[in-house]
Image: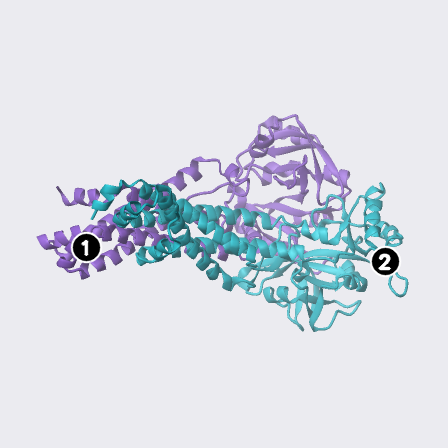
Chain colours: A cyan, B purple
């Protein structure tokens, strides 16, 4: 017969001072774990959330970032008229050749130095191909002018990036005329300017990447194999959505860090839980003796105490998730190891992460209470009853 | 029985609890030291001896933009400049590895010794490198990692240029702060990848430290309003600009540090009060026998302080030994090359431990002070 859950649950609160400390300790461990993982989740969300399922992205083979990719003008001309590409109402192919440049800009607070930001020279078709991006303030840039539209998150993080202001790169000045939002996609970390203007200002003969809309899903696959198999093209074609979701190089080290920190801190928390549970077992020696006399078996007592420890830590886990929760949606930024530019993203505490955090705390509790539980179950009945 | 041995006996009476407390303090302090060192490494990267005389020149737009090779004679003529070399990031992937594990730069081989004098190689290796165009030199750590030796051939595929290059290893150097990089001839890159006319950066050496500010200023001014404006800065400033690119990492690590410290205080304080509560009865007896409050406080404080210090020795000492004598590049998968536990960091951790020892004794001291002898004697807990 199992011990009534109520017995263990109520016992969690009997020695409340030690219990509160242990619960809080576990809560902080879980909060750190969840927060670090939520950074990785935010980064992954931004890359997984980018692109249109109908688009195919073409970059140079071997290039790991769009900014170091090159598509020559001849290659672009050939690609442009491939039959698998969708056409608009005027029978023009939906193809956009963009130029992507990393520029160094001062951060919002001058003391924080500079960072690289991705500037995309984009054509009107290119904007049409990226329906995720919407203007939220001001207007789009006029062709042939040194005007820029900045994503609002980059605008918050860098100096001179609000409407009407002018930022300088190399010897050239761009006036910000609008703010855009990319709906949580990678485009939220970009500055957009006119493609031809970008090519002349940054002295680029070639394009960085080509984005096309395939006429049909089958067409997209045909297009990919057509480009990949053509010996003349040292190019890689891939679905746009896949291209972005492969950008995980930044999130992986963060995840590793989160796991390392979580593990190291949890060892400390396990010791704390052990201490609490040993004290609890010691104080209840007589009670345990009574339970055994009543007919509860050793393994029932064992299970009861492990459960008690898990419950204790589980409460801590829940509280830890609550601690972490206010950070959900908080914007931050760091250098991306995929684009080498600043990536703006948000902490994302997903339900799955919260579940992971609570499970983690349950494990801490169960491991921490295992040895004390064994001790409880092995107490000799008579001696236990005699104990004061 | 002396007071000292009384305290020791008390502390170790419940050996399991003493061990657990010491270990939890030790684990947390170990983590604290590791985080502090990480923070220091990323905000203040280690410096080479020759760094004070070196200047890095990059495109003002950003590091990712190339510079025209025609800038070389202009820079060479700047007063105070001793020697200049191109320095071009190749971004090559070795074998089938997913990510780059060591950096490769193309440069002017003949300038190597004068600009990066820290790199130690035999005279024969130096000469071989200077004379053979398709040769390269690699750092000792990279050579060990891939079991490469002088005379081997390696081939790398660039992620920046549409080409692959094959190299013959002419030498293996050591003695720099990061013996991992590979260096090869700019000329070889130009021919193999068609990059004639452009370089990644310029690195130069100035004649004396006093020349540094004037040289960087002159170079910056020389190319102002040209099609390729540059930013010339000392090696140190260049490194620090990398750190600012990392973004909010610093805040992030610092906040984790404070959470760790807080958790530590919480857990140890609770352990300490548990230890004291367990012997409220004994303390009541001591009180009845005539010990004063002050003396009881001292007993509790000494015990808690002692436990915290034992944890400190274990945690800080362990971190010091591991990071000083262990192989840091291997442990961190190449992210950190040096992981120096400085006296300052150890002192900070030690201070945290002693404050912890004091704080942990407060709550139990208060309850002992409040307790009446009669109640204390009655306690069964």
Q: Seen from this angle, which residue lies furthest left?
A: B289
The location of residue B237, given as percent across then percent down, is 55, 52
In this picture, residue A18 sits left or right of residue B294: right
Q: Give the class, few, some or many, for how many residues have Cα within 10 Å of label 1's Cα (few <14, many ≥20).
A: some
Residue closest to the eye, A259 or A76: A259
**Disc marking residue B129:** none
Residue closest to the eye, A65 or B151: A65
| Secondary structure type for disc 2 | loop
Read off the chain for label 2. Answer: A
Toward which corner of the image does residue B164 lie, by quadrant?
top right
Residue B97's place in the image compared with A308, above or below, is: above
Give me the residue at 31% from left, 57% from top. A14
The residue carrying mark 2 is A86
Please identify, in this view, whether the residue under mark 2 or under mark 1 is nearer the observer: 1
Residue closest to the eye, B35 or A318: A318
The location of residue A165, given as percent across then percent down, is 66, 71
Is residue B344 visible from the viewing direction of this image? no
The residue carrying mark 1 is B379
- Tell me how far mark 2 sits from mark 1, CA to CA: 85 Å
């Amino acid at each position: 017969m199992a011990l009534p859950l109520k017995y263990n649950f109520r016992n969690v609160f009997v020695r409340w001072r030690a219990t509160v400390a242990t619960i809080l300790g576990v809560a902080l461990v879980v909060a750190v774990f969840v927060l670090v993982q939520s950074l990785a989740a935010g980064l992954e969300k931004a890359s997984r959330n980018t692109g249109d399922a109908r688009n195919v992205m073409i970059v140079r083979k071997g290039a790991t970032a769009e900014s170091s990719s090159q598509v020559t003008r001849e290659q672009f001309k050939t690609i442009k008229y491939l039959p698998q590409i969708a056409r608009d109402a005027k029978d023009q192919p939906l193809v956009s050749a963009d130029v992507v440049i990393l520029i160094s800009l001062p951060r919002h607070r001058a003391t924080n130095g500079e960072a690289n930001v991705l500037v995309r020279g984009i054509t009107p078709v290119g904007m049409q191909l990226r329906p995720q991006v919407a203007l939220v303030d001001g207007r789009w840039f006029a062709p042939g002018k040194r005007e820029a539209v900045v994503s609002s998150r980059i605008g918050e993080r860098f100096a001179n990036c609000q409407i009407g202001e002018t930022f300088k790169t190399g010897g050239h000045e761009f006036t910000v005329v609008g703010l855009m939002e990319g709906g949580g996609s990678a485009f939220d970390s970009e500055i957009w300017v006119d493609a031809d203007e970008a090519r002349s200002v940054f002295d680029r003969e070639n394009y960085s990447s080509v984005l096309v809309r395939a006429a049909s899903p089958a067409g997209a696959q045909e297009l990919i194999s057509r480009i990949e198999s053509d010996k003349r093209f040292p190019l890689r074609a891939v679905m746009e959505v896949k291209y972005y979701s492969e950008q995980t190089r930044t999130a992986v080290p963060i995840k590793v860090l989160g796991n390392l920190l979580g593990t190291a801190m949890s060892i400390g928390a396990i010791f704390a839980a052990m201490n609490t549970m040993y004290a609890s077992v010691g104080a209840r020696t007589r009670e345990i003796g009574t339970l055994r006399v009543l007919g509860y078996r050793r393994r029932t007592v064992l299970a009861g105490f492990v459960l008690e420890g898990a419950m204790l830590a589980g409460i801590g886990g829940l509280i830890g998730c609550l601690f972490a929760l206010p950070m959900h949606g908080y914007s931050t930024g760091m250098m991306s190891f995929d684009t080498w530019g600043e990536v703006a993203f948000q902490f994302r505490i997903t339900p799955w992460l919260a579940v992971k955090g609570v499970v983690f705390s349950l494990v801490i509790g169960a491991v921490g209470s295992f040895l004390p539980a064994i001790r409880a179950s092995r107490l000799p009945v008579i001696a236990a009853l005699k104990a004061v | 029985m002396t007071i000292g041995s009384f305290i020791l006996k008390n502390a170790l009476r419940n050996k399991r609890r003493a061990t657990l407390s010491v270990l939890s303090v030790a684990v947390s302090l170990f983590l604290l030291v590791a985080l502090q060192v990480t923070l220091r490494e990323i905000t203040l990267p280690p410096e080479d001896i020759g760094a004070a005389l070196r200047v890095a020149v990059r495109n003002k737009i950003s590091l990712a933009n190339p510079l025209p090779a025609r800038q070389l004679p202009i820079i060479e003529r700047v007063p105070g400049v001793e020697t200049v070399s191109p320095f071009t990031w190749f971004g090559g992937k070795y074998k089938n590895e997913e990510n780059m594990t060591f950096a490769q730069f193309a440069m002017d081989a003949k300038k190597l010794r004068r600009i990066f004098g820290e790199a130690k190689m035999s005279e024969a290796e130096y000469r071989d490198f200077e004379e053979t165009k398709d040769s390269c030199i690699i750092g000792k750590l990279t050579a060990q990692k891939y079991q490469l030796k002088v005379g081997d051939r390696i081939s790398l595929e660039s992620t920046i240029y549409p080409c692959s290059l094959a190299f013959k290893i002419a030498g293996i150097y050591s003695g720099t702060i990061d013996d991992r990089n590979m260096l090869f001839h700019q000329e070889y890159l130009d021919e193999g990848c068609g990059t004639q006319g452009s370089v990644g950066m310029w690195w130069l050496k100035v004649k004396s430290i006093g020349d540094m500010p004037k040289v960087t200023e002159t170079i910056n001014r020389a190319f102002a309003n040209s099609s390729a404006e540059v930013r010339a800065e000392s090696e140190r400033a260049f490194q620090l600009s990398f750190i600012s690119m990392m973004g909010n990492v610093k805040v992030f690590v610092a906040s984790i540090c404070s959470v760790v410290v807080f958790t530590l205080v919480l857990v140890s304080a609770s352990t300490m009060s548990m230890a004291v509560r367990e012997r409220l009865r004994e303390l009541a007896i001591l009180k009845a026998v005539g010990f004063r409050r002050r003396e009881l406080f001292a007993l509790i404080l000494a015990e808690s302080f002692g436990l915290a210090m034992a944890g400190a020795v274990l945690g800080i000492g362990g971190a010091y030994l591991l990071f000083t004598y262990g192989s840091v590049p291997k442990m961190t998968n190449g992210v950190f090359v040096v992981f120096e536990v400085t006296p300052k960091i150890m002192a900070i951790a030690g201070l945290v431990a002693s404050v912890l020892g004091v704080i942990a004794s407060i709550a139990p001291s208060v309850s002992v002070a409040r307790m009446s002898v009669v109640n204390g004697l009655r306690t069964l807990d």
